Image (cartoon, grey):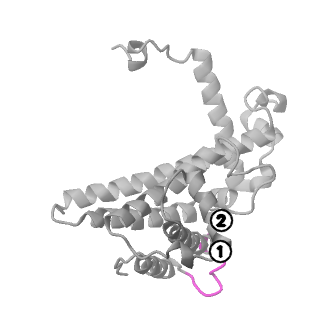
Amino acid sequence: MVSADLDEGVAPPSRRARVRAATSQEIISTARGLLVTEGSAAISLRAIAREMGMTAPALYRYFSSHEELIHHVVADIFTELSDYVESAVADAETVLARAGESTAAPTDATEIGLITACQAFRRWSVGHQAEFGMIFGTPLPGVDLYQEEPLLECGLRFGGIFLGLFVELWRIKPFDVPPDDEIQPSLVSQLERYRVQLGTELPLGVLQVFLRCWVSLYGTVALEVFGHLRFALDDATPMFELMLSDLAGLLGLSYGI
């Protein structure tokens, strides 16, 4: 069978390129293993080389610096998280379709998708506490999620999952958002900058409500992941579901616990 690449006149990757890509991914995976078992401080080129049976200088053939390697580790984690959330949303939509919900309102699928995305984010985060800490905890020196590639692209993809579902819900069934003249002046310019970054013409009030939802979601998940709810709760699931119920109310939805 002739591949699509050959049909279009594009040569497949050479064996050397495939080996290089595989080795680069192994280096990233090894770094993630050290992160999980020993913490972010253990991710050094020397430690990775030792785990892989290589010399530290040999790693420079794949990554020009320790900082570049960390960027790719963070991007790899973000990509995995995005894949996980997207897969969970797709599975939920499939279950809804198979249940014969042909008479359901268009909001039903979007609402289920949004709730599912939030639950999947929490589930992945609790199961990957070290990785969560690396991308959502204290910023690492030299790692700027909002400026540098491939981090910016991966971060925007992750955020876009939630923003896409959120905006779709607002367009199908508009919920209350504050008009521009009721938004705190100190927030207006920041929201305008955020809107330009997104390349959208959404009302500032929609973006404000979206950020309010994200702050609640992230804050609740981070408190659980970092163990800051253990003073009161052994199982944070009911509290998380209460938070989802509050968010649903903010969006004009009914979410039962």
Residue 137 location, x and y as percent?
70, 63
Q: Is residue 228 left or right of residue 174?
A: right
Residue 112 location, x and y as percent?
34, 66
Above or below, 189 against 238 in this view is: above
Residue at the limit of the structure toward the front, as seen here: 181
Foreground of the two, 34 or 78: 78
Residue at 63% from the left image edge and 47% from the top image edge: 152
The range drawn in magenta is 224-234
Kindly identify the amino acid type of the residue bearing the numbered disc 1. Answer: Pro
Residue at 22% from the left image edge and 57% from the top image edge: 97
Above or below, 188 against 234 in this view is: above
Residue 133 location, x and y as percent?
68, 61
| Numbered tag placed on residue 185 in the rendering | 1
Q: Residues within 10 Å of mark 1 (few under 14, many from 20)?
A: few
Q: Is residue 120 left or right of residue 29?
A: left
Residue 102 location, x and y as percent?
16, 61
Helix, strand or loop at mark 1: helix
Magenta part, dominant SS:
loop
Q: CA distance from mark 2 to mark 1?
A: 7 Å
Q: Which residue is mark 2?
A: 189
| Numbered tag placed on residue 247 in the rendering | none
Q: Is residue 64 left or right of residue 126?
A: right
Q: Is residue 181 left or right of residue 47?
A: left
Above or below, 121 against 232 in this view is: above
Residue at 38% from the left image edge and 57% from the top image edge: 89
Residue 226 visible in image: no
Residue 48 visible in image: yes
Kindly identify the amino acid type of the residue bearing the numbered disc 2. Answer: Ser
Helix, strand or loop at mark 2: helix
Foreground of the two, 209 or 118: 209
CB under 8 Å between callouts 2 and 1? yes
Residue at 40% from the left image edge and 68% from the top image edge: 115
